[in-house]
Amino acid sequence: MLVCALVLAVVLVAVMGILYNDFDGQMREELSKEALYLAYGVDQQGVDYLKNIKDKNARITYIDQDGTVLYDNKADAAEMENHSDRKEFQKAEKYGVGESSRYSDTLSEKTIYYAQRLKDGTVLRVSGTQDSVLALVENLVLPLVLVLFLMLILSGIMASVISKRIVKPVNELDLEHPEENQIYEELSPLLSKIHRQNREIQNQLELAKQQQAEFSLITENMQEGLIVIDKYTMILSANSSAWSLFRVDKVSQGESVYCLDRAEDFRHAIEQVLGGEHAELILKLNGSDIQLIANPVIRGQKTEGAVILLVNVTEKLERENLRREFSANVSHELKTPLTSISGFAEIMQDGLVKEEDIPQFAGRIYKESQRLLQLVEDVIQISQLDEEKTSYTWEPVDVYQVCKNAFESLKEKAQSMNVHLYICGDSMKMEAVRTLLEEAVYNVCDNAIKYNRNDGSVSIFLTQTAHEIQIVVKDTGVGIPREDQDRVFERFYRVDKSHSKEIGGTGLGLSIVKHAVGTLKGSVILQSEEGCGTEICMKFPKTHVE
């Protein structure tokens, strides 16, 4: 549109200039010819010739030598002023002919005067008017507006059509595969650059995806919970272990970490780490002890977020508690027989024991020392079972023979308590650590005899499937109260301490059984009813898998 308007303006100026100059020259030529014809007529007939002319288009003025107007076809000559000062008159007087032009600002017209001197010295002047350039332009305003309006419409239509035709291939570019586009040659460098950038971006995306997948693989296989938050406490990333520890469904990214736990100590730890300090505490979550370790993420001098590590330390704390309890119990259990031995020995040393009572005191000392020895052996045994690095030899073991040997070892004790022993089953073999299997069977049978009644019985039932062997030891003893059944496998735990003291024992027997069976990849199930006896079922896989 601008180009068209500029071209129109330039062409209009040029055409108007050419036409105006052409019309001006044509009018001057016509005035000169008309003056020549009129001069001939005046020379022949005088002023009367002028008065007989009917055409009023051109103005004819007849001037005397002194500038007095003798005749004018459009005005009264008597009322007209002297024309001696007119340029065309002066030139005609001097050169024979003269021309001049004058403009009228009010009429926007240009008047051209042509004067010719006659033979008698008088001057005949012919004049004609023509519109100025400005007047011509004013007359062309309406056509120009129409032309401009038409130009605007045509330019808009053509611009729309052309731009759509030009832009259509650009809009249809396949930027995913820019090298396959066949369009304007001028776009080839741009498409080549886009192709290179796409390739670089694709490589970067693949690398980022690979790194993200590796990071997710690492974090998702962590037992510890991992949470990354920003400085506004919003969760940026977390693994499934974190959700498991808090026992919540996966929280969407962007939610506050406070939605996991609103406890005061947790909030204080988050505020502390976002303040730029290391934070650490133990959280109580759903009956578990969770250690929270939080470190700030600092960029420059500002804290941008934090990394929170959650570790389930319940088992660790329980082990520490068990270790302390074990040490206290061992100290107590060792102190009791040692005190008895020391007391009896001191009495004998001081000569306070009669000669006939010495064997009785010696027997008491022997009994307490045996009890002490048994305690030490049990402690050593359970310590060995606790040692996970202990190497064991796995071999085929006849389960029936192990049970038979255990009864043989306990035969005397059973006879002294009038308890009958029975084995129901056939010979069957499994891969096991012989010493551990023997310890487990022996301790279960030993407990079954200890806590039995007079004329009671202890029975072993052996059964097997394609992949499993089951050893069930059933007695007719005193049984175990329901409230104590969950704790009988704890170290040094005794149901009836007074009764246990009478019959002996360290309280480690069933704890040794639990550890031994666990090491053999088996399981223990206890069923008991107070006053009716106890049944302990031990299940083992037939083959050992590393």
Image: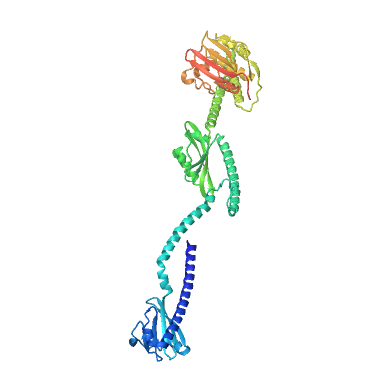
User: Measured from the top left, where is residue 173 in percent x and y?
Assistant: 55, 48
Residue at 47 percent of width and 31 percent of height: 287
State left or right for residue 355 relative to residue 453.
Answer: right
In the picture, which quadrant includes the C terminus? top right
283 horizontally vs 382: left or right = left
215 and 187: which is toward the camera = 187
Q: Is residue 369 visible?
A: no
Q: Quadrant of residue 408?
A: top right
- Tell me where residue 443 appears, x and y as whole percent: 58, 17
Q: Is residue 543 above or below residue 294?
A: above
Residue 148 shown left or right of residue 461 in the figure: left
Q: Position of residue 110 (x, y in %)?
A: 41, 78
Res 393 quadrant in image: top right
* Residue 387 sits above or below residue 304 on the image: above
The structure residue drawn at horizontal position 41% and vertical position 81%, both measured from the top left corner, is 127
Q: How many marks?
A: 0
Q: Does 428 sit above or below residue 234?
A: above
Q: Residue furthest front?
A: 44
Residue 192, percent across and down? 60, 50
Res. 252 visible in picture = yes
